[in-house]
């Protein structure tokens, strides 16, 4: 298993190398402290797995992800900041490790890499979701997301105090990914954040729309109204 380590701190790279070296099937083909070097090593050695620190000096591990070319390595993100829990699919993430890395947890990661089974844990409002749009890639805090609207094969994220983002991901994946109990599907093409709802207007003839905190108008699907009403009455 050819592995690459990307971390801007030499002690962290040394420690991860030490831990990985205990597995006789692991071959560390390179170490990098910056994105440019990591990309060069990736092109040269084509590692099967890249252990990537999220926070780098002046960069992030997601700058590396956004510039990767095929064939992509499987990614294991490593960070001291648990608020950067990885929830993305486009980034090809197999796992997420919190520093300081524990040997038992790393062994579990290597088992997951061998089986190619992605790590999945339901997000919370304090987590961030990995978003890739075109050639850019970054984290978006779930707390910033006001609504997610389907546009054909794409979905658009409407954010608080920021431009919307269009990405290739179906609404169904967002339903599986979003923090439980904090987002509500109100239309076959719309998912909204519960605490972003400011008003529900009755338009007559069994038609309704929601007004969100940012002024966005969201139609309410008739098939969803009964469930929405029950949930709001409980709240």
Image (cartoon, helix red, strand yellow):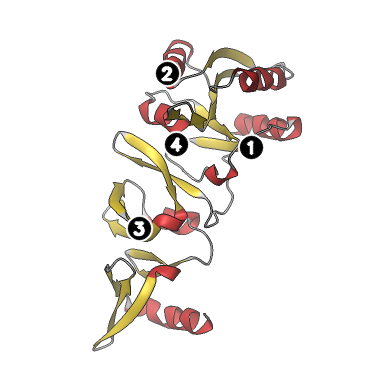
Given residues 66 and 69, the one toward you in this image is 66
Tell me where residue 67 appears, x and y as whole percent: 36, 26
What is the distance, in whole Å, between disc 3 and disc 4 at their CAs?
Answer: 24 Å
Residue at 32%, 46% in the rendered image = 168
Give the number of the disc on residue 201. none
Which residue is identified by label 4? 91
Q: Earlier in the sequence, mark 1 or mark 2?
A: 2
State the separation of the CA atoms marked 1 and 4: 18 Å
**Alpha carbon separation for disc pair 3 and 2:** 33 Å
Percent from the top left, x then y, of residue 59?
A: 43, 28
Please state which of residues 213 and 134 is positioned toward the viewer in this rendering.
213
Rendered image quadrant of residue 22: top right
Residue lying at the far bottom in this picture: please name it: 205
Q: For numbered disc 1, what is the local secondary structure?
A: strand
First along the sequence among labels 1 and 3: 1
Give the CA separation, mark 1 to mark 2.
Answer: 23 Å
Residue for badge 1: 98
In the rendered image, the quadrant that contains the N terminus is: top right
116 relative to 46 in the view: left or right = right
Residue 97: percent from left, percent from top:
62, 36
Label 2 crowd bin: few (<14), some (14–19), many (20+), radius 10 Å: some
Query: Badges 1 and 2: C-beta atoms under 8 Å apart?
Result: no
Residue 83 in the figure: left or right of residue 214: right
Q: Give SS at disc 3.
A: loop
Task: Give SS at disc 4.
Answer: loop
Residue at which label 3 appears: 160
Residue 153 seen anywhere in this rendered image of the structure: no
* Dot in front, 1 or 2: 1
Q: Circle 2 is placed at which residue position?
A: 39
Does residue 107 appear in the picture of this structure? Answer: yes
Indicate the quadrant where residue 24 lies.
top right
Position above or below: 190 against 27: below
């Amino acid at each position: 298993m050819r592995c690459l380590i990307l971390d801007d701190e030499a002690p962290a790279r040394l420690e991860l190398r030490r831990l990985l070296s205990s597995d006789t099937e692991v071959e560390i083909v390179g170490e990098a402290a910056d994105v440019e070097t990591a990309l060069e090593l990736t092109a040269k050695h084509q590692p099967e797995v890249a252990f990537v620190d999220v926070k780098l000096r002046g960069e992030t591990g997601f700058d590396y992800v956004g510039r990767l070319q095929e064939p992509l390595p499987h990614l294991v993100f490593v960070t001291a900041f648990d608020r950067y829990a990885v929830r993305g699919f486009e980034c090809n993430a197999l796992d997420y490790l919190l520093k300081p890395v524990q040997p038992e947890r790393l062994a579990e990661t290597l088992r997951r890499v061998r089986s190619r089974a992605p790590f999945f844990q339901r997000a919370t409002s304090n987590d961030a979701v990995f978003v890739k749009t075109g050639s850019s890639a970054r984290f978006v805090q779930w707390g910033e997301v006001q609504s997610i609207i389907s546009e054909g094969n794409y979905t658009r994220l409407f954010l608080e105090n920021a431009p919307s983002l269009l990405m290739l991901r179906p609404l169904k994946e967002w339903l599986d990914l979003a923090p439980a109990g904090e987002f509500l599907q109100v239309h076959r093409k719309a998912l909204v954040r519960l605490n972003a709802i400011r008003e529900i207007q009755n338009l007559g003839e069994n038609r309704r729309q929601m007004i969100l905190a940012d002024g966005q108008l969201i139609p309410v699907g008739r098939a969803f109204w009964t469930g929405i009403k029950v949930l709001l009455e409980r709240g």
